[in-house]
Image: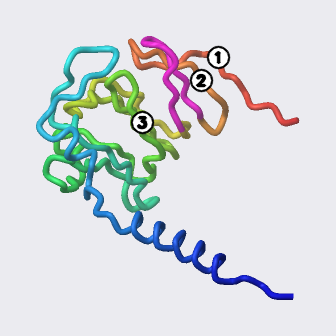
Amino acid sequence: MKIKTAPKLLTGALALLLMVSASCKKDQQNPAANQFAGKSITNANSAAVTGKYTNGFFIINEGWYAHGDGSVSFYSYDTQTKQDSIFTKENPGKTLDPITSTVEYGTVFNDKLFIVSKVGGPVVVTDANTLKEVGRIPSASGNNWQAFLGLTTTTGLLSSASGIYPFNLTTYTTGSGCFKCRHL
């Protein structure tokens, strides 16, 4: 029985050549930076969004429990640099204390950055474009916030170790009811 390996080898070599040539093309180093450089970003809820923190992304740093409460950094596509501790720089005299808490979670919803802290920490709401604080649930020993979910322009949910609470996005307060987790 004679096996014809030449056509199989040729087909395999051609496929390998195509993969190598496709993988060696030069890509843009940072397409998002080039796409948005020098432009305002527009979202569905507003006209052009402008501000110091519109062209990049936030980095939420948990911190080291009992040694630091965490921080918020920002990576700018325009300058291709990371700016550290921007919350404290933009809000002199305000912190994410107490030192025993740590930042747990952060997300942008409706042009607001929600910074959620656990172990007695606060929930801080800032303008996502300027990082200026607009609201806060103060630190308290019973707080153990874990995450935030925006639902509508006036309502969100805050999760904690004790359950999930409705969160008023106008007054920045939690509702009295708690949706407790059920074990199945």
Q: Residue at x 42, y 16 (%)?
A: 169
Q: Residues within 10 Å of mark 3 (few under 14, many from 20)?
A: some
Q: Where does the N terminus fall, quadrant-wise?
A: bottom right
* Residue type at numbered disc 3: Thr
| Label pair 2/1, CB-CB below 8 angstroms | yes
Q: Which residue is mark 3?
A: 107
In the image, residue 136 sits, relative to residue 171, either above or below, namely below
Horizontal side of 53 relative to 123 (left or right) equals left
Q: Quadrant of the C terminus?
A: top right
Asked which secondary structure carries label 3, the reply is: strand
Residue with the mark numbered 1: 177
Q: For residue 90, what is the image quadrant? A: top left
Q: Earlier in the sequence, mark 2 or mark 1?
A: 2
Taking the image as shown, residue 10 lies to the left or right of residue 126, namely: right
Write the residue at 84% across / 36% down: 183
Residue type beneath disc 1: Gly
Disc 2: which residue: 165
